[in-house]
Image: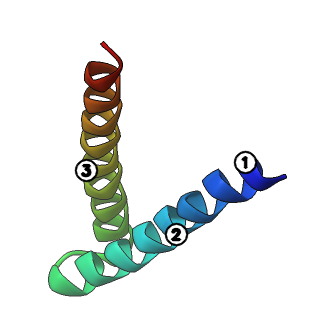
């Protein structure tokens, strides 16, 4: 149960962060229609998370060696 909470809380925080980032990105590009900017914001946020998680995993694997 402890492990589930350990990983579920940061995951939920990442989801909320993605929603906030998408909404703010949509407001930043207010000349474009809302659906397009929400999709663009989501893709940018997911790309950032992929790079971040890859870096964390790579550094964790380097520490084990």
- Which residue appears at 72% of the width and 48% of the height? 3
Q: Is residue 53 above or below residue 12?
A: above
Q: Nearer the viewer, mark 2 or mark 1?
A: 1
Q: Quadrant of residue 26?
A: bottom left
Quick one: label 1, few (<14), some, or many (20+) residues within 10 Å? few
Q: Which residue is mark 3?
A: 48
Q: Is residue 10 left or right of residue 50?
A: right
Task: Look at the numbered disc 2 and give the secondary structure of its residue.
Answer: helix
Q: Is residue 34 left or right of residue 55?
A: right
Q: Is residue 39 above or below residue 50?
A: below
Quick one: label 3, few (<14), some, or many (20+) residues within 10 Å? few
Q: Nearer the viewer, mark 1 or mark 3?
A: 1
Q: Residue furthest top?
A: 65
Task: Look at the numbered disc 1 and give the secondary structure of its residue.
Answer: helix
Residues at circles 2 and 3 in contact by the CB criterion of under 8 Å:
no
Q: Which mark is residue 3?
A: 1
Q: Which residue is mark 2?
A: 13
- Classify the position of the C terminus by image quarter: top left
- Which residue appears at 47% of the width and 63% of the height? 14
Q: Which one is in front, 64 or 17?
A: 64
Estimate the x, y position of residue 33 in percent, counting from the top left.
Answer: 29, 75
Residues at circles 1 and 3 in contact by the CB criterion of under 8 Å:
no
Q: Is residue 18 left or right of residue 47?
A: right
Dot 1 or dot 3: first in sequence order is 1
Dot 2 or dot 1: first in sequence order is 1
- Which residue appears at 72% of the width and 59% of the height? 5
Looking at the picture, the colour scheme in use is rainbow
Residue 27 visible from this viewpoint: yes
Dot 2 or dot 3: first in sequence order is 2
Q: Nearer the viewer, mark 2 or mark 3?
A: 2
* Label 2 to label 3: alpha-carbon separation: 15 Å
């Amino acid at each position: 149960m402890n492990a589930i909470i350990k990983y579920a809380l940061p995951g939920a925080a990442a989801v909320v962060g993605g929603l906030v980032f998408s909404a703010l990105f949509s407001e930043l590009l207010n000349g474009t229609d809302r659906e397009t900017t929400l999709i663009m914001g989501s893709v940018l946020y997911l790309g950032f998370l992929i790079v971040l998680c890859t870096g964390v995993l790579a550094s964790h694997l380097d520490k084990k060696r």
